[in-house]
Image (cartoon, helix red, strand yellow):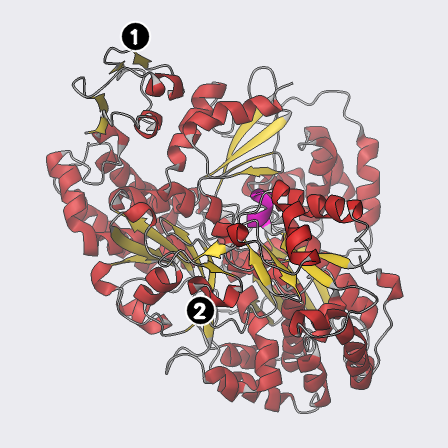
Amino acid sequence: MLNVEDLPRLTSPQDLEALKSRVLPRIAIRKDPKAPPHNDVTHHVMICCDTGCASSGSKAIVESFHKELTARNMEKTVDVVVIGCHGFCEMGPLLVVYPDDVYYTRLRPDDVAEIVDETIINRRPVPKLLYHDRETLRPIVRYNEIEFYAKQNRILLANCGHINPEDIEEYVAYDGYKALAKALSQKDDPMALLEEVKKSGLRGRGGGGFPTGRKWELCREAPGDEKYIICNADEGDPGAFMDRSLMEGDPHRLLEGMIIGGLVIGAKEGYIYVRAEYPIAVKRLKNAIAQAEALGLLGDNVLGTDFSFKIHLKEGAGAFVCGEETALIHSIEGKRGMPTARPPFPAVSGLWGKPTNNNNVETWANVPGIILRGGDWFASYGTDKSKGTKVFALTGKIRNTGLAEVSMGMTMREIVYDIGGGVQNNKRFKAVQIGGPSGGCLPESMIDRPVDYDSLIEAGAMMGSGGLVVVDEDTCMVALAQFFLSFTRDESCGKCTPCREGTTRMLNILTNITKGKGKAGDIELLEELARNVKLAALCGLGQTSPNPILSTLNYFREEYKAHIYEKRCPAHHCVDLISYWIDPDRCIGCGACRKKCPVQAIDGTSKKPHTIDVAKCIKCGACLGACRKSRAVFKK
Amino acid sequence: MTVIAPSPSHIDLVKLEPIFETYKNVARGSLIPVLQAAQDAYGYLPTLALETIAERMNAPISQIYGVVTFYAQFRLVPRGKHVIRACQGTACHVRNSSTILETLKSTLGVTAGGTTADLQFTLETVACIGACSLAPVMMVDNDAHGRLRPDRVPEILDQYRS
């Protein structure tokens, strides 16, 4: 682990270049398989230990490597590097072995000895541990040949999974902080830098899609010497984790973007407001800030210039509404995180009443690339009005769960089928929900449209932060809308009546419908309430809260009608409208279901048909999964 | 409605001193970090600690109480030895997290937010822990358990019983 005290203070762009030249030989084998070993290190084993892979057991893989390497006296020649997210979380734990660039997935600790013996000592891949192509079943050695990655354009996530996120030197070796050096060389002409950001066409990645350059300009032009910038890392959308992965996998890119932003806007302090539920991200950011300060890239006299900039880390305390910028500002100030009416906009009067610019993690992290390679380069990706790339979190009933970065304008079909591998378990695709609790869904008929800010709005959804939840024939759309409303109802801060009461009323109606207590007129009442809440709520949380209802009503009105008029849930999801039943003609009395039932609701003797006590049954479906031999358990 | 628990008399207020020391030079905005640190020290926020924080930070107790009850992270009552957080995020929802929560409730005999009588487990829900690839997920203390099925829940809990 890098020791902060050992880091030299850099006082000029030349110092930064010199550091890069010093570090490059250390990581050369990752870029060039023929590169000579550095300090006798012949191999790098890069193991993802992000939240996803860590939950699948990657820590045990790391320990197993240390053990096996020590046993073979190889711990000095093989570096085990903990990295951030590769994006293919479905296949975790995963790792890459350099210099041969071999990608292994779904590992268990007892696979490690074979990797050491075969791949590191004999330099041969272990075919059974490689990823296998879904169609051809052929093993694939290099990860960029896997269909999940082939259609992606990883310009923002370029470093994620390739560098050690706890080592600033590796970031520098991959041209890190070079954009900052370039920006500092033009610091007397910040308008030129602003122009570059405007030219890039970058729009806010947190959901709104407001042009970033224009936002910066408003804050820059606001009167006052004391200004602040904020990074909204309160990624509260359930089903979105791209910001977490960026912070965990490449934290310096975010810091560099913020420092450049501070320079352009004229702020000397920035705040990162990060969810406390992301402990690894918090740890990596703290570490990154300390290292950047030690190198003189953050703090007083950045890179030897008269520009100084400080970054503070604030841990959120769990309130979704704090994603709304005025609420977030109050939370940083130590108050209840409740939104206030705009104007005044934060650009004029924000944190501590001073001009404040707030962008989300992905937006800030796009800035270094734009400054280093130019606005035109960034604008060469994407569509006419939505430039660049967007990171999507693919989740739900999709085969390849994970993070995918694609050019704006790719169709939803390509994202879901070509990258995501289509729907799990050969079920039928029903819809993709995008934009979280503020967003909407796109049914089969809409997924050939390009994915960009404007076309999603037209379709009644929104980009949001980019969480894509695929749902199949087993998902009830009324229950999905109810799920989102129960979320927004819980998270409504209660300040304004339309949101506080509106979400409660809408949720009550939806809950009644899913319980089979819906009545004629409910749909019309929902629509009326939805319109009013949209118009009258104080902040974005309330204004967008009816979107999941409106969009499911728009595309799946028949499902609502089936619940209300026929007391039937077409997806067999709503527990009050279904029951489990064992077909006595099929049941062979094997007892598998009886053993799996967590509430002892199944009765029966061996080799005789079993029965379910509906009074005890909690409808968990465990029996359905357990009944494999005779397939006698049904939902009805 | 949240009710402030009666404060046991053995709350050791000395634990707050290092926290005040850390934040004494932070001019503004330090209330939430102080409360977070205090909760780390006690496991929850005892009334006596809140009163001390109010006094030392020169803020009315009503303001502190307002902040504490606004954020999901803060707790006014002690929790069980192990905290279970059942994820209720979208990805988990569409992969049937509700059945996991139901199984947890029936196995433990508590509702969400409740603590078992033997003080072994507290059951909470969480909006999303960002491990959507493993849905449905629950956290027990700091361990994430993914790809859950209702029938696996009791055996996972058994690992934590002592």
- The chain under label 2 reads A
Instruction: Give percent across and percent down for residue A253.
Output: 64, 70
Q: Position of residue A273 (x, y in %)?
A: 61, 58
Mark 2 crowdedness (10 Å alpha carbons): few <14, some 14-19, many ≥20:
few
The residue lying toward the viewer, choosing from B106 and A176, is A176
Residue A150 numbered mark, or none: 2
Eyeballing the image, is A619 above or below A6? above
Left or right, residue B62 beside residue A462: right
Read off the residue under disc 1: A605
Compare residues A391 and A315 and report the one nearer the observer.
A391
Residue type highlighted by circle 1 = Thr
Task: Give yes or no for residue A460 being in the magenta stretch.
Answer: no
Vertically, is A112 above or below A185? Answer: above
Chain letter for the residue marked with disc 1 in the picture: A
Crowding at label 1, few (<14), some or many (≥20) Cα neighbours within 10 Å? few
Query: Furthest-front residue in view?
Result: A122
Image location (x, y in percent) of residue A474: 26, 42
Q: Start and end of the magenta stretch?
A: A51-57
Residue pictured at 45% horizontal, 85% vertical? A380
Which corner quadrant of the image does residue A439 belong to?
A: bottom left
Task: Say which amino acid is labelled 2.
Answer: Ala
